[in-house]
């Protein structure tokens, strides 16, 4: 198996360098402007919905436990979104960003998240508006659906759906299993191929049960693991609370290139901006087009309610969990930017927590990281399934995706970390750009839905959604809502 991994590394090495060069150009000159620009656009159009309605976001999330008519509850949809949001990106992704971009990368992750909350709100609202009822009683939806029904572009919708299926059935499982394998290898000496077999085997047990099975598992696992990780982070914060002022000082100074010692291995302000944005995108997924697939599955009274819940997920992911990881790493004293390389990101966070709390935490932390990655694999299948359904795929196509997710969960564990992250960046670029274009063009429907919600909220009483009463034109296909009414 060691010889096999060496052969794979030799084969993927040149591909990694080639893709990394392309990614650097795309993310530097296209992605940063597109992501932040779209977030600012929706912040302006919705008059700061992520700030004005933050209280409602928390309230709806807390009250969204029940589904309707056998559908998936709003909380279950939130949990599926949380499964891919709060995970490996919060552990390895933050570590990778800080190694390459220095502590300042964390600041740019915050910026992407704060404006991205408005983007996440918009894409979830659109996913709800244009969702479709599935024969099993659940809903399906996402960017492919609102591109076709809203923009009336079958071609662009198909491009998105095909790209999304590849990204989520190939690249995403590889990233998750690779990080799990890196942590278990560094902390417990578990061979990567063994970890790959375990992840693939467990994924098969859940994924072969379909989307409902994924919803049931992620409803329990994702919030529980996120809470457990936050508890560990709080413990580290308590132990190192005197370093909090220094932590924020280092982050802000490094973010604007004001202290050379805090530059990441890639060096300088641009490195902090580039790596913070790139890893922030992967972590919170705002604008990426993945979470709308989960948002569409929810049974809610009004599209805006699920938009608020999904927006809150971005806050939990980056402002809470990623910040906790950054604090853990920076206060541990283990962020040696002269010594560490990208491959060290797989175990840096774990080493930092163990260094602060002691060796006893190694096993519980490994369990948390395992389920972070595992739940993300499950979420990836749920999203891929929505796009397979859109493409008209039959049971054979769906099973092909399930098998791909399982196989890639094994293969990713034995590949080089830099290769799988680079592949993920490349795969997600296409779907993100297509999704952002659609979001901007359909922004008027997001604003219309928000105004309808706020009007009903001001009047009091039960909130519901009627496309006609809300002023949506008859040729805009919101048939799932018309049937529900």
Image: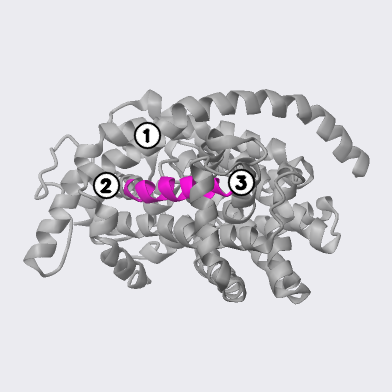
**Label 3 to label 2, Cα distance in Å?**
45 Å
Residue shown at 68%/66% (left/top)?
Answer: 353
Q: Is residue 266 above or below residue 111?
A: above
Question: Does 228 sit above or below residue 250?
Answer: below
Q: From this viewpoint, which residue is outermost toward the left?
A: 459
Task: Name the residue carrying label 2.
Answer: 129
Please state the extent of the stretch shown in magenta in the rendering: 102-118
6 horizontally vs 477: left or right: right
Crowding at dot 1, Cα within 10 Å, few <14 / some 14-19 / many 20+, comes out as many
Image check: 3 left or right of 13? right
The reply to whether the magenta stretch includes residue 184 is no
Q: Secondary structure at mark 3?
A: helix
Disc 3 target residue = 262
Residue sitting nearer the eye, 416 or 294: 416
Note whether 355 is above or below 26 in the view shown: below
Instruction: Determine which of the numbered discs, if any, sits on residue 436 in the image.
Output: 1
What is the CA distance from the residue labelled 2 to the residue labelled 1?
17 Å
């Amino acid at each position: 198996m060691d010889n096999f991994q060496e052969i794979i590394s030799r084969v993927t090495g040149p591909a990694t360098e080639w893709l990394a060069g392309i990614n650097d150009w795309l993310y530097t000159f296209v992605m940063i402007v597109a992501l932040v620009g779209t977030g600012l656009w929706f912040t302006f159009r919705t008059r700061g919905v992520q700030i004005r309605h933050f209280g409602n976001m928390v309230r709806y999330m807390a009250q969204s436990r029940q589904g309707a008519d056998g559908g998936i509850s709003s909380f279950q949809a939130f949990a599926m979104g949380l499964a891919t949001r709060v995970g490996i990106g919060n552990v390895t992704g933050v570590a990778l960003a800080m190694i390459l971009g220095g502590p300042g990368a964390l600041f740019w992750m915050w910026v992407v998240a704060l404006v991205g909350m408005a983007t996440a709100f918009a894409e979830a609202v659109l996913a709800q508006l244009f969702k479709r009822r599935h024969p099993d009683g659940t809903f399906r939806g996402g960017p492919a659906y609102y591109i076709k029904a809203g923009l009336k572009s079958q071609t662009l919708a198909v491009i998105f759906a095909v790209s999304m299926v590849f990204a989520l059935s190939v690249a995403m499982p590889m990233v998750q299993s690779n990080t799990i394998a890196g942590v278990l290898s560094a902390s417990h000496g578990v061979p990567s191929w063994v970890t790959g077999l375990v992840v693939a085997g467990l994924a098969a047990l859940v994924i072969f049960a379909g989307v409902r099975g994924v919803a049931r598992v992620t409803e329990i696992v994702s919030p529980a693991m996120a809470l457990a990780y936050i508890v560990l982070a709080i413990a580290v914060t308590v132990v190192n609370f005197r370093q909090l002022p220094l932590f924020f000082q280092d982050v802000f100074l490094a973010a604007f290139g004001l202290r050379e010692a805090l530059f990441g291995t890639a060096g300088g302000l641009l490195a902090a901006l580039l790596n913070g944005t790139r890893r922030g995108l992967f972590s919170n997924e705002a604008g990426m087009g993945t979470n709308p697939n989960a948002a569409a599955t929810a049974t809610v009274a009004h599209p805006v309610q699920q938009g608020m819940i999904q927006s809150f997920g971005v806050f939990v992911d980056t402002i809470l969990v990623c910040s906790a990881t950054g604090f853990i790493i920076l206060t541990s004293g283990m962020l040696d930017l002269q010594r560490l390389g990208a491959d060290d990101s797989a175990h840096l966070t774990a080493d930092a927590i163990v260094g602060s709390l002691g060796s006893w935490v190694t096993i519980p932390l490994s369990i948390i990281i395992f389920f972070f990655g595992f739940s993300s694999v499950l979420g990836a299948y749920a999203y891929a399934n929505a796009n397979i359904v859109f493409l008209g795929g039959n049971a054979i196509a769906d099973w092909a995706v399930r098998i791909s997710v399982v196989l890639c969960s094994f293969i990713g564990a034995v590949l080089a970390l830099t290769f799988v992250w680079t592949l993920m960046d490349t795969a997600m670029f296409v779907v993100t750009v297509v999704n952002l274009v659609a979001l901007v063009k359909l922004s008027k429907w997001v604003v219309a839905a928000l105004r309808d919600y706020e009007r009903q909220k001001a009047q009091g009483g039960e909130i519901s959604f009627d496309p006609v009463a809300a002023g949506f034109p008859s040729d805009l296909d919101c048939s799932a809502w018309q049937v529900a009414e």
